[in-house]
Image: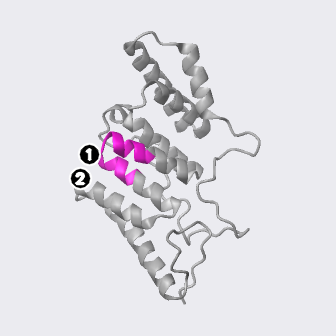
Amino acid sequence: MKLTWNKKNSQTCKRRPFAAISRFPNLPFDQQDDGGTDNVGTGSGVKEGEAPNNQEKALDSTRDAAPDSDFDRERLARSFQAQGDKLAEEGKYQEALGKWESALTLTPGNAALHEQKAQVLLELGDAWRALKAATRATELNPSWAEAWLTLGRAQLNFGEPDSAVQSFDRALAIKPEWEEAQDDRRTASNLVKRRKHLHSSGLSTEETRFVVGDKANTS
């Protein structure tokens, strides 16, 4: 997959720095779990027994660097972010996350980094952590439409199309003519309608979320 990064824009939050990425790798009804179990939010993109602890690595990295001033802290954070960007361009997502975690340890208020992190986590299939990262991006910069778009996509992949519709609406309130957000909102809205149809067809009314592995039988 070709990844396009715009470092200037990632600092200013003018647009999403992670431009070319699959939007909904695990949409409900698009994939079925052959084993019959749910796989939402558990994917990590790492082989069993090899999963790194990115937060621990981040703490080790920042400990070793030990910046003495706010200026040094920001400069070191930018260095970690640049290293992570390069690794992500090469498809080394776990390594990229480790560098970004180091940067976020130094500058936790970087909304663009939280949003980038959310996109990569979606690419790795970790919808839950992507949702948390995207939520943080919207909290830090609620007027950034791209952060709301990423949050909506994370909510879709986590099986919450109702919440996704609301997030896409927030993005469109900021950028009303944004076709990408309009398309994603239609996708989420169609999933909400499909769920209502399943409920009316006898699915438990207690079911409030889609999950990967749900099987649609609308015939």
Q: Residue furthest front?
A: 206
For residue 173, side relative to residue 35 (left or right):
left
Specify the segment rendered in magenta: 134-150
Give the amino acid type for the residue marked by disc 2 in the picture.
Ile
> Can you identify the residue that label 2 sits on?
174
* Label 1 residue SS: loop
Asked if residue 35 is positioned above or below residue 15 in the image, the reply reads below
In reply to whether residue 206 is colored magenta, the answer given is no
> Can you identify the residue that label 1 sits on?
143
For residue 170, side relative to residue 52 (left or right):
left
Image coordinates for residue 146, horizontal then vertical, percent: 34, 48
Disc nearer the start of the sequence (1/2)? 1
Would residue 89 be seen by someone viewing this image from the given angle?
yes
Asked if residue 47 is positioned above or below residue 38 in the image, the reply reads above
Residue at 23% x, 52% y: name it: 174
Q: Quadrant of the C terminus?
A: bottom right
Q: How is the image coloured?
A: one colour
Q: Are marks 1 and 2 in contact (CB under 8 Å)?
A: yes
